[in-house]
Image (tube, grey):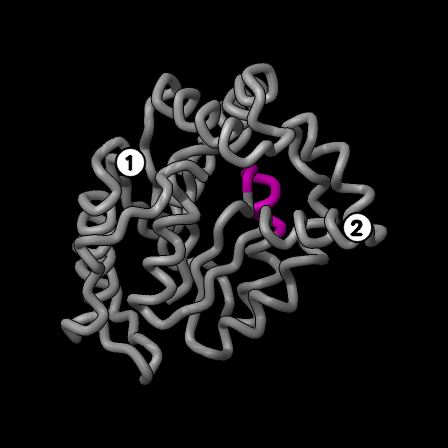
Amino acid sequence: MRLLLIGPPGSGKGTQATFIAERYGVDHISSGDLLRRHVASGSAIGRAAAACIDRGDLVPDALVMDILRKPVEAASRRGGYILDGFPRTVAQAEAAYRVAEPLGASVRIALHLSVSREELTRRLLHRGTQTGRTDDTAEVIAHRLDVFAASTAPLLDYYAARETVISVDGEQPVEDVTRAIADELDRARRRLGIALPPQRDADDPRSAPASDAAPSAAR
């Protein structure tokens, strides 16, 4: 299963990506996490990306592609991935497709988490008080949401024309979002004939989501 997770900042992508990776036995690849590791390490890529992240701007395509190429190729060989945070524009999606398709590593399903701007702002401001992240201030949050609306939302139309798009209401309680995602993905993978890695069968009750989990909804 090769899946792209599309959602604005604060929609719960990190929480749900972790669940998807565990349930379906695929790698969770987060461009944001990879970039933050480079920033923390002080690498050349990290220094180039830091200013963009602090402003809430998109990091240049070439930097993100360099970071993601090897993890995506390796995950595809192991049975699939859940990609979180890239591509964020149609131009990035087209460039990623040209690289990934010859390798058999292109996205098959796009999963969209739908959350209102008001709820996203509330979640991100709360996260900022808990974590101190420099991109969780009111001004930067507003800018990040504007960037998402202008640049990333058109990805839904792009993938709808090429692949399967699933949209889930991300304002529900976390456990309800998780169950809805599992139901939709199971239907999609059966319809598309997508096999799972041999170490995990999503029909196995041991891989069902835990109902008592209470992860953070903001990502």
- Tell me how many marks there are: 2
Residue at the image point whose x is 60% and y is 33% from the top: 133
Residue at the image point whose x is 47% and y is 23% from the top: 125
Locate the N terminus by quadrant: bottom left
Residue picked out by circle 2: 45
Question: Which residues lie in the magenta part?
Answer: 88-95
Mark 2 and mark 1: span between their CA atoms? 32 Å
Tell me which secondary structure the magenta stretch mostly adopts.
helix
Closer to the camera in the image, 24 or 163 = 24
Q: Amino acid at mark 1?
A: Gly
Locate the C terminus by quadrant: top left
Q: Amino acid at mark 2?
A: Ile
Q: Position of residue 131 (x, y in %)?
A: 54, 36
Left or right? Give the position of 17 relative to 99: left
Res 196 → quadrant: bottom left
Left or right? Give the position of 48 relative to 64: right
Neighbours of disc 2 within 10 Å: few (<14), some (14-19), many (20+)? some
